[in-house]
Image: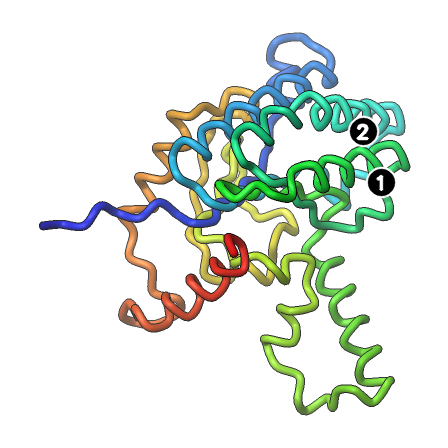
Amino acid sequence: MDETPAVPFHIAIIMDGNGRWAQARGLMRALGHRAGAEAVRRTVEAGRELGVRVLTLYAFSWENWDRPAEEIRGLMDLLVEFLKAETPRLRANQIRLQAIGRLEELPHRARATLQQVIDDTASGDAMTLVLALSYGGRQELVDAARRIAALVREGRLLPEHITEAHIASHLYTADLPDPDLIIRTSGEMRVSNFLLWQSSYAELYVTPTLWPDFTKAELAEAIAAYQHRERRFGRSQPSPRQDEAIGPAGRRQVVG
């Protein structure tokens, strides 16, 4: 009997297209972001229903700080509103919230609300929702290098003993498995400084759909495409042993 293809354990999404969605409808960008928040709600629910165990959403990039101050304030207010409104739903569905990025850069109200929801949902064991906020892949690597350099300076680590595992353990995602599938909406063919280290062997799926129009059907289609691919992890032939090394070790950290 054929085995049912596995749903990707960890899906990460570059949510792109809010501004273009609003522009195409003659609306203010703020309304595009609000429609994008509704797409987040749908996608979290769909991911839970489809069996995704970790869902990471690129919600606010490090580069987004260069946007107009008014737009940033609106995004932070929307973040607070979304977190407060979704807490009961997250708890009811046993979804725990985590966040990655330079979170100390967030405004106090947003940071405090985020931490409160993280605490309130900590017991969720059905799915982990990760929000990448004030996040940049290069910035993450810089921060990891600084922490490792501090260990070397303190005499707790020799430079020649630094391994890939050391670097991974000092990333924001140290307690998460690497993504299996990265989805980008709006048709742009770039990773935009997102999970640069962690996405080394992830499968990529790009859809022309703008983020506010992303649906459960779109997510299911991306998962189906993933299930028809043969993951090689840089090898000429698939390596079940390598798959086991990458998958279950990280997965136990998430669900344990």
Q: Is residue 143 left or right of residue 251?
A: right
Measured along the vertical axis of the image, is residue 253 above or below residue 18? below
Which residue is tagged 2? 76
- Residue 147 at what x, y percent from top left? 79, 71
The percent coordinates of residue 59 (x first, y second) are 67, 36
| Whether label 1 touches label 2, CB < 8 Å | yes
**Which residue occupies the extreme front position in the image?**
123
Q: Quadrant of residue 65?
A: top right
161 versus 240 height, above or below: below
Categorize mark 2 by other alpha carbons within 10 Å: few (<14), some (14-19), many (20+). some
Image height of 98 relative to 141, above or below: above
Name which residue lies at 60% across and 40% down.
96
Q: In the orientation shown, which residue stands out farthest toward the left?
A: 1
- Look at 51% across and 39% down and name the residue there: 184
- Farthest residue toward the top? 26
Compared across the picture, whether 64 is left or right of 93 comes to right
Dot 1 falls on a residue whose secondary structure is: loop
Question: Disc 1 and disc 2: Cα gap in Å?
Answer: 8 Å
Kind of residue at disc 2: Met
Disc number for residue 106:
1
Q: Quadrant of residue 241?
A: bottom left
Q: Amino acid at mark 1?
A: Leu
**Element carrying mark 2:** helix
Q: Depth check: give the residue in front, 180 or 88.
A: 88
The answer to whether residue 146 shows anywhere in this view is yes
Image point (65%, 15%), residue name: 23
Q: Position of residue 243 (x, y in %)?
A: 37, 66
Q: Earlier in the sequence, mark 1 or mark 2?
A: 2
Q: Position of residue 181 (x, y in %)?
A: 44, 48
